Amino acid sequence: MARYSNSQIALHWLTAVLIGLIIALPYGRDFFGDFLGGTGGVFVLHKSLGLAVLALTVLRLLVRARHGAPQILPPDAVWQQRAAKAGHALLYLLLVLMPLSGLLFGKRPLELFWLIPLEPLPLSDTTRAAAKWFHVTAQWLLFAMILGHALMALVHHYGKRDGVLAAMLPAARG
Ligand code: HEM
Ligand code: HEM
């Protein structure tokens, strides 16, 4: 049965875990602050993981350009294929635009993983404000997309009992 390549599967699940953490950090800033030396540390990690997701997404898109994506849905399920394609494209777009907008609105130097200092970009206050507006607004679209995406995967697996989820899971040995 058609499956994603191992590198595509690894990049998908690594990204999913990182996105979970990236979202949990600002909302659980008090909790995580206890381990990370305060809110400052929470945002160092939020920003660093966000930029890691940007790098992983660029890598993922390169891998996809090379390997393509497997044809998993039946060839005659035309509108489902279009909907899945559009949903995945929007997820990729958000995986690029969320970290980019975060990078644009920062006014203070960023310490990548507490190791590499990055100077803020020389941008006007208007541009920063627009980027910040996008970052905090588009999060809701991201949440909706992730929920809908995971729900569809479960509907395919438990409702339709087809191979959509299996195509994105590590191969069972046997
Ligand atoms: C995949 C990447 C990212 C996602 C999904 C994401 C998501 C979020 C979310 C959900 C919040 C909470 C917003 C709120 O309190 O309403 C937030 C806040 C924030 N993010 Fe990100 N972020 C990402 C990457 C980045 C990057 C790369 C940076 C900076 C380089 C950044 C900087 C910030 C800052 C400074 C805030 C606090 C905004 C405020 O003052 O309320 N984020 N982000
Ligand atoms: C932060 C969370 C997630 C993000 C950002 C995300 C993103 C994506 C993207 C962009 C694709 C398209 C891959 C491609 O064709 O190149 C994809 C495929 C897929 N994802 Fe996720 N995903 C997330 C979480 C999940 C979860 C929780 C599940 C399962 C419950 C899941 C199941 C799948 C499956 C089964 C596919 C293959 C679907 C198909 O090709 O028809 N994903 N995901």
Image (tube, helix red, strand yellow):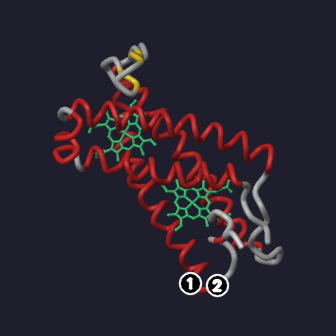
Residue 164 picture location, percent across and down:
67, 72
Which residue is denoted by mark 1 in the rendering?
Answer: 158
Amino acid at the residue labelled 1:
Tyr
Disc 1, SS: helix
Q: Residue furthest right?
A: 75
Ligand 2 within 8 Å of disc 2? The answer is no
Are the two marked residues, 2 and 1, in contact with CB atoms closer than 8 angstroms? Answer: yes
Q: Quadrant of residue 74?
A: bottom right
For the point 33% across and 21% down, which residue is it?
125
Left or right of 101 in this view: 46: left
Circle 2: is it few (<14), some (14-19), or many (20+) Cα within 10 Å?
A: few
For the point 19% across and 32% down, which residue is it?
37
Residue 9 picture location, percent across and down:
64, 55
Say above or below: 3 vs 78. Answer: above
Say above or below: 85 vs 116. Answer: below
Circle 1: is it few (<14), some (14-19), or many (20+) Cα within 10 Å?
A: few
Which residue is denoted by mark 2 in the rendering?
Answer: 161
Quadrant of ligand 1: it is top left
Instruction: Assign the C terminus to one quadrant of the image.
Output: bottom right
For the point 68% across and 43% down, which residue is it?
61
Alpha carbons under labels 2 and 1: distance apart = 5 Å
Disc 2, SS: loop
Left or right of 45 in this view: 8: right
Amino acid at the residue labelled 2:
Arg
> Disc count in the image?
2
Q: Quadrant of residue 13?
A: bottom right
Instruction: Assign the N terminus to one quadrant of the image.
Output: bottom right
Asked if residue 136 shows in the view, the reply is: yes
